[in-house]
Image (cartoon, rainbow, N blue to C red):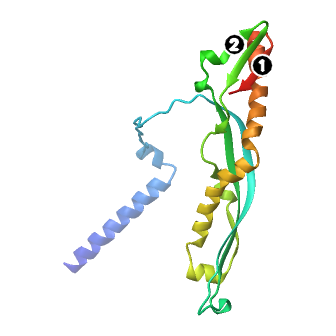
Amino acid sequence: MKKILIAFGAGIVAALIVVLLLFSSPLAKFIYSENAVSSTEAVLKAFEKQGKLQVIKMYLEQVHKEEIVRDLFGVGFLAPNSRTLVAFTSVATACIDLTKVTEEDILYEGEVLMISLPEPELCDDPYIIPESFHVYDQNLAAMILDPQQEITAQQKAIGLATEKALNNDILKLARDQGESVMEKFLSAITNVPVSVSYR
C-alpha cells in the first residue's frame, strides 16, 4: 500500500512538472491560450454647466511655520516646543463668469461694440500641488508630542492660499487680462472696435 501511495505521489509530481514545462516552452501557444476580458461601467452621477473664462492662473511658492509654545509651571524651557516648517506651491485660478452676461450688458454705439463684464472671481478654492509639499524642519518634540502637526500645518496653509492669492492682486490681473482677451476676441469676429468694461 505504501509503495502504491509513493508511486501515485510521484506520478502527480511528474505530471505537474510536465505541465509546467509545456506551458513554459514554445509549444505552449499550441496547447494553451488565454484572453483577458474586462469591462468598465460608468454611471452619470451629476454634471455642472460651466461658462467661466479662465484668464489667470497664479502659482505661489509659500513657506508656513507651525509652532506650539509650551511651558511647565510657568517656565518655558522645561517643556519642549513643537515646530514644523513646510514649503509648498499653491495654485489659484481667476475667471470671468460669462453666463452672467445679459443683453443689457452688450451695446452698440456708433461704430463701437461695448460690453460690460461681471467682476472676476476665483474659479475654485486654491489648491496645493501635492508633490511640492515638503517638511523642511520638524523637531523631535513635534513628532512625539504632536504627530498631527504636519497635517495641521498643511490644512492651515491651504486656508491661507486664498488670502495669499488675493494679496498678490490675482483679481486685478484677471481684470486686465480679461479685458485684453475679450477685446481681441470680439474685434476679430465682429471687425469693429470693442470696448470692454466691468460692472
Residue marked by disc 1: 195
Instruction: Indicate the quadrant where residue 152 lies.
Output: bottom right
Tell me residue 169's x, y (percent).
76, 44
Tell me residue 140's x, y (percent).
64, 83
Tell me residue 176's x, y (percent).
78, 33
Earlier sequence position, callout 2 versus callout 1: 2
The residue drawn where x is 75% and y is 22% is: 196
Asked if the residue under mark 1 is in contact with the one under mark 2, i.e. CB atoms within 8 Å, the reply is no
Question: In terms of secondary structure, where does tag 2 sit?
Answer: strand
In the displayed structure, would residue 63 be above or below residue 96? below
Instruction: Indicate the quadrant where residue 157 lies.
Output: bottom right
Residue marked by disc 2: 107
Residue 58, disc: none
Tell me the distance, in whole angstroms, between the alpha carbons under discs 2 and 1: 10 Å
82 with respect to 22 (left or right): right
The residue drawn where x is 74% and y is 50% is: 167
Question: In terms of secondary structure, where does tag 1 sit?
Answer: strand
Crowd around label 2: few <14 · some 14–19 · many ≥20 (10 Å): few
In the displayed structure, would residue 159 be above or below residue 3? above
Q: Quadrant of the N terminus?
A: bottom left
The residue drawn where x is 44% and y is 54% is: 22
Amino acid type shown at disc 1: Ser
